[in-house]
Structures are given as C-alpha cells and as structure tokens.
C-alpha cells in the first residue's frame, strides 16, 4: 500500500510544492517487506487561501489509485492558524471548563478550546479555539462579540508568533523595541501615536507597516514579510 501525505500547515502558508517519496509494501507467504521506490510523486500545492484549504479538508472525493497504484490519502490532523480565533478579556471568575462550554454552546463547530498562557500576570484571560467551517468562522468575526456568562467578550483572529526580528513599538521588521527611534509607540492597526493620558480609539481598519497593504504588519499576506521570513 502506498501512502501519500497530502499537505502540512507550513505548506499552506508558504505556498510551496510538496514532493513525497512513495513506498510499496510487498507481501508473500514467507515474508513481508517494505520497498522504497525511486520514483517520486509531486503534488503541487495550490492552496494559498482559507477557502481552498477548507474545501481540501472537507472533501472525501479522492482517487483510490494513481497510475494503477493503490494509494491512501492522509489528511492533515491539525488546522492552520488561519482558522483560529481568540476570545479576549474573559474575566478571571470563569474557569477554563466553563469558558470552553460557553464557546462550544455559542459556536457549534468550535473545537480545541484552550487558554493562552502568558509569561506575566493579567487581569483577564484569552482563549484560543479553531473553527474549521469557513462560513461560521467569518460570521463569528462579523459578530465581533461572544457571551461568556454575563460578559460580552471580544473575538479577534489569532495572530501566530513570528520567529524573526521585529519591533513592537513601530511594527517594522529588522530591529527590536529597545533599538527603535520613535518617541511614542504606535497602534498596531493604524500606526497612530499612543500617548500617555490620551484616549486612543482604534478604527479596526488594519494597515501594514511594511507595504501599507490592508493586512497586519506581521501577516503572511505581506510579500516583504514573507521574503524577510525566508531569509532569516
């Protein structure tokens, strides 16, 4: 039996081509062995959007053979961070199990609910969860709020951490906060100065600090971000 691994989380984000070696199992009355074939199966990864990935993991219509060779398609056992949401500012009075029940009660397809662990003490908790259905994911984002007990909590997309050098003061790549030349830190979405004693009202219309596109500064949608990421 030949095994074909279809896709991984990094392949989804990086839009790269997947090449997997094929293996064939040979059985006889006396012995069973696995023979690695020299040929390769090249699977072109065209899934660079959430819509395409949602279709990929939801469909069950796969061929049983390729070039007259029996195959088994193994779907990813995990979901990319692009399908993750975060319930923010949940009061500490609600324990983890209660919050999980509330999220699953409001969102039928929510799964893998867990509290985000921070390295410092906070007055509220944040909870990350996955919504595989793209329609429910988008409708949940439009609601912008979810009820946890008697509290309406904010829902935002989950932004994955980046293993690269960037500044949390100006949100540009290439330096860190202690090396930034700005006098005042800037809003992550609109880059307005955050001044002590002044109330900041965010418009929630995001812009990129690298290319001024309509996405977050550290988003994989930014070409400058992706180039810097692969260089490092």
Image (cartoon, rainbow, N blue to C red):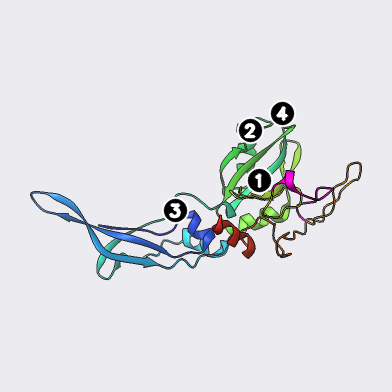
Q: Position of residue 164 (x, y in %)?
A: 60, 50
Give percent across and percent down for residue 196: 88, 42
Residue 54 spot, x, y in % from top left = 53, 60
Give SS at disc 2.
helix
Q: Relative to 120, does residue 178 appear above or below in the rendering?
A: below
Q: Which residues are magenta?
A: 176-189
Upstream in the sequence, badge 4 or badge 1?
Answer: 1
Q: Residue at x 17, y 51 (%)?
A: 33
As drawn, 72 above or below 158: below
Relative side of 158 to 190, left or right: left
**For mark 3, what is the residue?**
76
- Mark 2 vs 3, N-terminal side: 3
- Residue nearest the viewer, comparing 185 with 135: 185
Residue at the spot of label 1 = 86
Q: Are marks 4 and 3 in contact (CB under 8 Å)?
A: no
Classed neighbour count for the residue bearing mark 4: other residues with Cα under 10 Å, few (<14), some (14–19), many (≥20)? few
Give the camera-side residue of 102 and 85.
85
Task: Report crowding for label 2: few under 14, some 14 to 19, many 20 or more residues within 10 A (C-alpha).
Answer: few
Q: Residue 48 location in percent, x, y?
A: 54, 65
Q: Residue at x 58, y 53 (%)?
A: 83
Q: Is residue 122 visible?
A: yes
SS for dot 4: loop
Most distant residue in the right direction:
197
Q: Which residue is mark 4?
A: 93
Residue corresponding to mark 2: 98
Q: CA distance from mark 2 to mark 1?
A: 16 Å
């Amino acid at each position: 039996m030949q095994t074909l691994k279809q896709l991984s989380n990094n392949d989804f984000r990086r839009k790269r081509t997947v090449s997997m070696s094929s293996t064939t199992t040979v059985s006889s009355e006396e012995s069973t062995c696995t023979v690695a074939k020299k040929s390769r199966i090249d699977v072109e990864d065209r899934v660079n959007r959430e819509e395409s990935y949602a279709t990929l993991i939801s469909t069950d219509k796969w061929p049983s053979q390729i070039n007259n060779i029996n195959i088994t398609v193994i779907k990813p056992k995990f979901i990319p961070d692009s399908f993750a949401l975060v319930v923010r500012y949940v009061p500490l009075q609600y324990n983890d199990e209660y919050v999980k029940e509330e999220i699953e009660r409001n969102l039928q397809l929510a799964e893998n609910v867990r509290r985000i662990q921070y390295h410092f003490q906070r007055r509220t908790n944040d909870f990350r969860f996955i919504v595989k259905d793209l329609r429910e994911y988008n409708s949940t984002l439009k609601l912008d709020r979810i009820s946890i007990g008697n509290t309406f909590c904010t829902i935002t997309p989950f932004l994955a951490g980046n293993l690269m050098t960037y500044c949390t003061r100006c949100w540009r790549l290439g330096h860190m906060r202690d090396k930034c030349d700005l006098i005042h830190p800037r809003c992550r979405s609109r880059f307005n100065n955050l001044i002590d004693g002044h109330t900041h009202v965010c418009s929630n219309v995001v812009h990129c600090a690298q290319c001024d596109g309509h996405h977050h500064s550290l988003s994989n949608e930014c070409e400058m971000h992706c180039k810097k990421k692969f260089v490092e």
